[in-house]
Amino acid sequence: MELSRLGFDPWFQDQASKLCLPEQRIARVTAVDRGWYVVRNEEGEVPARATGKFLNSTESTMNMPCVGDWVCVHYDSEDSASIHTVLPRKSFLHRKSAGKNIELQMIAANIDVAFIVQSCHYDFNVARLERYLVMAKEGHVEPLLVLTKSDLVTADELEQLILLIRRGGISTRIIIVSNVTGAGLDQIKELMSLGKTYCLLGSSGVGKSTLINKLSGQDTLKTGTVSDSGEGRHTTVRRQLIVLEQGSMFIDTPGMREIGTFGVSEGINEIFDDIQKISFSCRFTNCSHTKEPGCAVLQAIEDGKLQPEHYGNYVKLKQESELNETAYSEKRKKDKTVGRFGQSEMKQSNKQK
């Protein structure tokens, strides 16, 4: 398989020529699992580890290899490689790490289209859709909404779900899918192109792995049984890139319980562009759209021109992102101070010896 079929284009070639040493080769990261990686080039896949030098020079988890990355590797043998450099990314998906830890967690890189998957039955949530859309836009990834398990709802119920999405100011294309009847699968196949990378985002059990199996025509990924409620069971345990027979690629990801926002101001502005446009008429240029007099956004809600739920999620995402950015900045300052103190103590200790 040629590297171009894995998505390697002239832009990446230019980056590789600047960053990879002559004895190193180009490969793409196809799986990540607890510090181990799988990389693939035109000859096949092998397990890989990041070198100690690379790890010591990496200041943030954001710079660690993730699924979809192009990397400079040295093949230590026929069945193992070492990762020396991660090439710059064209696009990416990241979120705040789960829990109280304030760090950015990379999900995948160099994606052309993100299929944001929700079930029509038990998982549907417009606020969560908006979070995924912000994530995609922030990383310069084209989003597309996929509503699965349409066979579990009536036509009227499905129409109401779509209406809720549109009322929320979301204009992204929607594809209605049923893994049982096969409805909508052809629409997705028509969108997929040779050498392009697609990513599935969504909660556990919404049918992401089943969807990949249907598109590939084989049981590429393990899937779980479905409960009486129509809710699937979580099966994907690691992020991995799968090359389909038709030449396109899919990145499957474990279901996300948390979609914390962090450093996504650009994505918020794009997804909530209706609020941004209204805000130009606010009396104050620095209006927070929460309590100021002459706020055009609050007036639009009062006039029924803006949905309160849509506005509420905008405020929540903006405040959450700003709060996490502040906490992260303070943490970095503290880490640097501790680091300088440690270096000073080490130098002083060496002088006394």
Image (cartoon, rainbow, N blue to C red):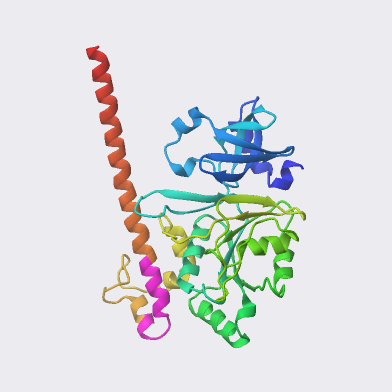
**Magenta span dominant secondary structure:** helix
Question: In the image, is residue 55 above or below residue 113?
Answer: above
Relative horizontal placement of residue 118, taking residue 210 as reference (left or right):
left
Residue 252 percent location from the top left of the image:
60, 56
Magenta span contains residue 312 = yes
Residue 57 percent location from the top left of the image:
45, 31
- Closer to the camera in the image, 180 or 325: 180
Name the residue at the bottom extreme.
Answer: 156
Residue at position x 41%, y 85% in the image? 304
Q: Which residues are magenta?
A: 300-316
Residue 43 percent location from the top left of the image:
74, 37
Relative horizontal placement of residue 131, taking residue 241 as reference (left or right):
left
Residue 11 seen:
yes
Residue 243 percent location from the top left of the image:
70, 51
Q: Where's the C terminus, which quadrant? A: top left
- Closer to the camera in the image, 206 or 330: 206
